Structures are given as structure tokens and as C-alpha cells.
Amino acid sequence: MKAGLPAVTAGREVNLALKDIRHNLGRFLLTCLGLSLLLGIVLAMVGIYRGLIEESLGLVRAAGGQVWVVEGGTRGPFAEASRLPGDTRIAIAAQWGVAAAGGVSYQNVEAQLRGQTKRLLVVGAQIARPGEARLVDEGRPIIRSRYEAVVDRGAGLVLGEQIKLGRDTFTVVGLTSNLVASGGDPVIFITLRDAQKLQFDLTPAASRRESVRSSGTAGTTDTVNAILVRLMPGVDAKRFAQDITRWKHLAALTQEDQETVLARSVIDRARRQIGLFTTLLLTVSTVIIGLIIYTMTIDKKKAIATLKLIGAPDRRIVGLIVEQALAMGIISFVAGVALINAGQGYFPRRVLLELTDAAMLFAVVLVACLVASALGVRTALRIDPASALAG
Amino acid sequence: MAEPPVVEVRRISKHFGEGPARVDALREVSLDVFPGTVIGLRGPSGSGKSTLLNVVGCILEPNSGTMRLNGELVYDGKWLRADLRGLRLEKIGFIFQSHNLLPFLNAWENIAVARILAGAGAAQAKGRALELLTYLGIERRQDAMPGELSGGEAQRVAIARALANDPRIILADEPTAALDSPRAAAVMDLLRKVATERRTAVIVVTHDEKIFDRFDHIYSLRDGALEPTRASAA
């Protein structure tokens, strides 16, 4: 080297992809921002689906039973209507191996709360029996037989606050977290007796008419949707359920069966809907990456022709395009994850982000980037090096 | 001349299309280009200048005839596309009408990239780039992006890039077309300097009459045929 030259610093290899990105940084980042929103929505969809499963199964799991005894020929209250006489609980509780049994009822109501209409899932359960609200994280469980409620925080109620359900007013004595119905409605626990009254009590006028119509012998309101059974240690739940099913008017599902029923009947449709949207969004993302990479390739046509003319091998040209597509995907993915992490508290539904889902989406994004870069690569490889000489 | 020619073109013909649509771009063209010489190639549009440049530049295979580059027979059916690409990288430097610097690389990176493509390490490539920038008198502009360079500076960087791998021949396509007279003269002075000091052969395709006196020989192409050569006035 001749004297007087500037000192040579050991530089990194000139990365054409990064250099080109830096040259068009504004456009590149704007594209990444748009893509990150799309990928963020994909992640939110998956997170909402996970949250949906968690919430739906959470209600079933929170009940604390091992066997669900339901109306014969049905799959239980989460799949279809199931009604049992309330006194069936006594017969079930008397079975060998039963540690405890409790009747439960489920019904959706709309309640007025601070001037707003709030939809709630009312769970009627018996005090200190399976089905009651076990996981109260503020306040206490229901201990009085009437007019007390344990409610999920999602309803926006606070301890000591009162809520009117039907013609009765309930005082909130306990709060739970993340206990909602599969539709997202917060759960409110009241005693079974209150729940039955809420469900079957008629207005005074209707009650009088009904009383006259049935000649003073009104039908019983002591019905439940299911009886939850907790078994003694060592008793096989499956075997117990099979034994109960022999009673022709009853059916029984183990906890596992109940979760499967819920997953299939309630969550499956949501899974398909969310899966469809996720697929559409990923397809749109792939098309966008493909189009952006293609236009970036077209913009670089002369530069690529020049590179080819001076002797750049095809793998360099392919690398330039694929690296840009991957950079776009990776940056967008990271930004999307950051966005969704920052904004998940603002979603109306619970968004449950799991590492495995993020890892899977990342892999899908990488594949999408490779697919999307194909058009750009094809275009680049077809550029005639002689075109660099043309003006 | 004692030294063998860098480029020996013998009875090269190239046509495009067949039948009535056939266009004979080159008709039995023969040409020798010796080390250290600067030759000019002129002719009207469609006369075959670009086709000849592409053939000599190992981009376009002729239909007939032979070509030797630095003594090696090029179009003998044994060369793969990748081999020709390697040959261009090692033996040929290209200079373009509109400099064709990569817009996303600065001056020294534009030069270094040619060296890196030839297998050099980053530090060595940068060293070579800075050496050439100094040789061509624009070392102060080493970090400037192409858009920040004047036409003359950009063309010097392009010349430096063409020299990055010490080519045996430089092919320049209208290198002064976008420059005013003083800058065109400066570019031709540089090409002359390169040819003399580095024993590089230089072929310049040009319409620019102002620089006709700068060549050792000028060849004219008309309808694909090379007309009798004459020594330039220089």
C-alpha cells in the first residue's frame, strides 16, 4: 500500500442486504411496522384462543369435581340442556366412594350495574360442596345461605358492593380472577337456592295465575343442571361414572370427559374461526412481504445487473434478497410480539401468550419469508447482466 | 509489438433471430487489443458496438469465430456460465455510462465489493479500495454515498471499482457521455494513466468526438462489420 493512505480498520464484510436496508430505511421500517401489526394480530388471535381454552376449562376445573352426573342421554350443561331433580344429589352422595356431592346450576343473566347492562354467568352451588367458588383471592367464600355472591373481577364489582339479580339484591363477599364463561361473561357464584329462585321465581301476578292453573300444586323448582362428585382417594372416576350411567335416567362424565366435551362443542368452533383468520392474516403477510421484496428487487434491477456483470455469483444475489425478506420477517415479528405484550391488557378477552405459540409463529414467519422471497429471487436471477451496460 | 494481445477476436459473428427477422449484429469481426493500449470503438446506434462489448466482456456467446482472453480460448463450449462470471471478475473491469455505482454502498464499499466478490477479506478489500481512491485522487470522498458525488467523482470511483481486481482489460461503455469536456478529458487521462502504468488494455465505446484524439487506435463499426482501423491523431 502506498504511503499516506488512511489507516485500514479491520471492517466487517460488506453485507449488501443490510446496506440496502439502511439506504431505504424509512420505507423498510414502515413496511415492518405494517407487518408487525399483522403479526401482532395473528399472535393476539392465538393468544385469545389460548385464553378462551384457559377460561372455559378454568370454570370446569374450578368446580373441583371428579365426576359430573348429568341428565341421562346428555353430555352435560356445557354442551346441551341438562336438568336433574335436586334430590338426586342425596342418592349420589350415598354411593360408595363418594367423598362429597353438590348440585350446581348455570344460567346467563343480564344485570344492571352502575347504569350499564352486564352479562353474567350465574353459578348456583351449595355451600362447602363441590361446585362452590373455591379460589377466592379476595374476601371470603359464601357462608350465608341467602343473598351473598362471589364474583369474578372481570365484572368490575368490588367487595361489599351490591348487585340486583332478578328481584333479589346480592352483596359481593368474595372476588375471583379469570373465571369467565366460554363466551367471556364473568362468573358470579350464588347459593343454589338463590339460583333456583332466580331461575324459577315468577312475578307475583304470574305466580298467582300459575297457582290457580295448577290447582294450588305448583311444580318443584328444586332442579339442578349437574351434580358434581368428589371421590374418596383411590376410587376410580371412570369406573364410578360407568356405574352411575347404569341408572337409566342419569349420565356421568369424568372431569376429563367434561373438558373434552367442552373443548369439542364450545371451543372447536372458535378454534376453527380463529384458525381461519390466522391463516388469512399469515397469507396476507406472506403476500405483502412478497410484494415488498419484489418491488425492492425491481428497484435494484440495475444494481443487480451491475453486480452480475462484475461477477457476483447467483448465491450472492439470492442472499441479498432472502436476507432482506428474513430481516423484514424477524423485525416485524419482534415488533409484533412487543406490541401485543404491551397491549394485551386492553383486549376485551383474555390474551394468553405462550412461548411455544410464539416460537411456532416465528418458524411460520421464517417459512413465509422464504416463500415470499421466491418471486424476488426469480426476478433477480432473470436479470440480464448485459442490461447494466444499457445506458 | 512484443507482448501478446490481451484480447484476440477472430472472425466473430453474432446474429439475433432467424429467417426474415434475423439481424446480423456482428459480421466476422477480428480485433487485437494489446496491453497498455487505449482503443476507441465508435459507430452509429445499432452498428454492433454493444454486442462486441458484450462478446469481449464474456457476457454474450458469439455464433461463430473465436476469442482469446489473456491467451485463453473463451467460447469453446467448455466454459460454464459461472466460469465466465469468474473470468469477468478476475480479468475484466467494466466502466459504465452512468457509473452504475451501487446506491446503497459508499465510495470505498463500492470498490471493495468487487474485491470481496473475488474472495478477499473485508480488511484487505478496504485497503485496496483506499489505495485505488488515493491513486485516482479522490481519497477524501471515501465515505461519500454515490448520490453525494459529482459526475466526475462518481466516474472515478467506477474506474477504481473496475481496477479493484487488477483486470487485464477494461471495457468502458460511453464513460464520458454524462460529463462535461474538462471532466471527460480528466477521465480519459485516468484511463490512459491506468493503461500506461498498469499495462491494462482499455476498450472505450464512444460517440464523443471530443475524446477521439485520446485513443491509440479507433475502430468503426457499421452494420456489424469492423471498418479498417486508423491510428488516432494522438
Image (cartoon, coloured by chain):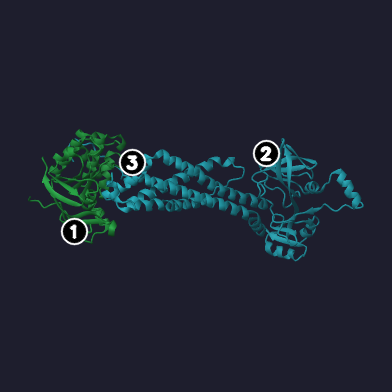
Mark 2, residue position: A156
User: Which amino acid type is shown beneath numbered disc 3?
Assistant: Phe
- Of pointers 3 and 1, the one earlier in the residue sequence: 1
Mark 3, residue position: B104
Colour representing chain A: cyan
* Residue closest to the far left: B2
The answer to which of A17 and A94 lies nearer the viewer is: A17
Left or right: residue A40 compared with residue A229: left
Q: Chain of mark 2?
A: A
Chain assigned green? B
Mark 1, residue position: B65
Left or right: residue A110 compared with residue A205: left
The answer to which of B99 and A391 lies nearer the viewer is: A391
Left or right: residue A70 compared with residue A278: right
* Residue closest to the far front: B20
x, y percent for residue A224: 77, 54
User: Which amino acid type is shown beneath numbered disc 2?
Assistant: Gly
Residue A35 appears anywhere in the view: yes
> Where is the C terminus of chain B found, in terms of image quarters?
top left
Distance in Å between CA atoms under marks 3 and 1: 40 Å
